[in-house]
Amino acid sequence: MNKQTADSVNASTGQIVRYAPSTRITHWLVAISFVLLALSGLAMFYPPLFGLSSLFGGGDTMRAVHPWIGVFMVVVFLVLAGKLHRHMRIQQRDRQWLRQIKDVTANREENLPEVGRYNAGQKLVYLVALLSLIVLLFTGLEIWRAYFTAYFPIDITRFAALLHAFFAFVLMLTIIVHIYAAIWVKGSVRAMTRGTVSYGWAWKHHRAWFRDVTKGSLK
């Protein structure tokens, strides 16, 4: 396969391209930005962790770069969202998947409805991340002392800071779940590093998607 195009099939190798290079690069830029934001945010929010500021060259530098990294992450995430949004609509089979969450956690995938390109859990992670980042963007701009804070009453700024911290916590928990699920479902990390998954992986975890992308290619 000379060119990696999402959802393309190579019958000779038994591999399906799940993520094109541009999608993987965008994903990892978001991931790196998130780690930097989480570390600097925790250092500012929780005094015992202020030592993490040394990773950024000190407290002043950390406070200066944190909002810029945040803006960068939101922009890159929106690019990623543009690539994924058409697959993220919650469907009836997703609702059924959620109702059978015990089968999901027990790895009884044969009892679940056939999953499309993304399962309901992945869609919820996407939606929570999208909502959280929108709130974090606007609250972050409001509490950005260098540019915007002076234009708002102090009570609004205090509320924005609390809201910012709350949604940052929600996003961190969501990403932890996302990472755990990626490790738990063997082969998922490879999909986002190398871009491809095996026929067996696609059939087991995303059977409806497998049927769509292999239609006519296995004849």
Image (tube, helix red, strand yellow):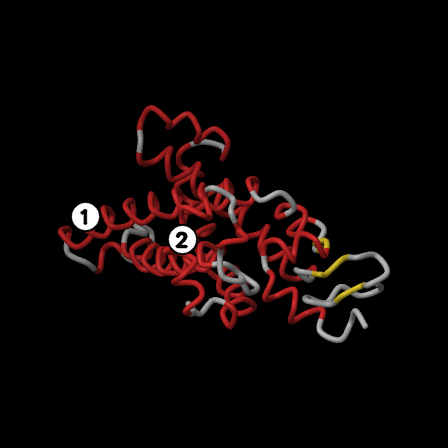
Image location of residue 97, percent across then percent down? 43, 58
> Which badge, 2 or 1, is on the more N-terminal residue?
2
Q: Secondary structure at mark 1?
A: helix
Report whether 75 appears left or right of 59. Answer: right
Look at 31% across and 49% down and name the residue there: 167
Q: Residues within 10 Å of mark 2 (few under 14, many from 20)?
A: some
Q: Which residue is mark 2?
A: 100
Picture layout, residue 192 above or below residue 209: above
Report, in whole angstroms, how far the alpha carbon at label 2 lies from the one at label 1. Answer: 41 Å
- Residue 150 in which image quadrant: bottom left
In front here: 104 or 151?
104
Disc ID at residue 158: 1
- Residue 26: numbered disc: none
Q: Residues within 10 Å of mark 1 (few under 14, many from 20)?
A: few
- Can residue 47 be seen? yes
| Nearer to the camera, 116 or 136 | 116
* Quadrant housing residue 93: bottom left
Q: Position of residue 126 (x, y in %)?
A: 45, 58
Say which amino acid is labelled 1: Arg
Quarter of the image with the N terminus in it: bottom right
Q: Nearer the viewer, residue 27 or 38?
A: 27
Residue at image position (18%, 50%) is 159
Which amino acid, mark 2?
A: Gln
**Which quarter of the figure is the C terminus placed in?**
bottom right
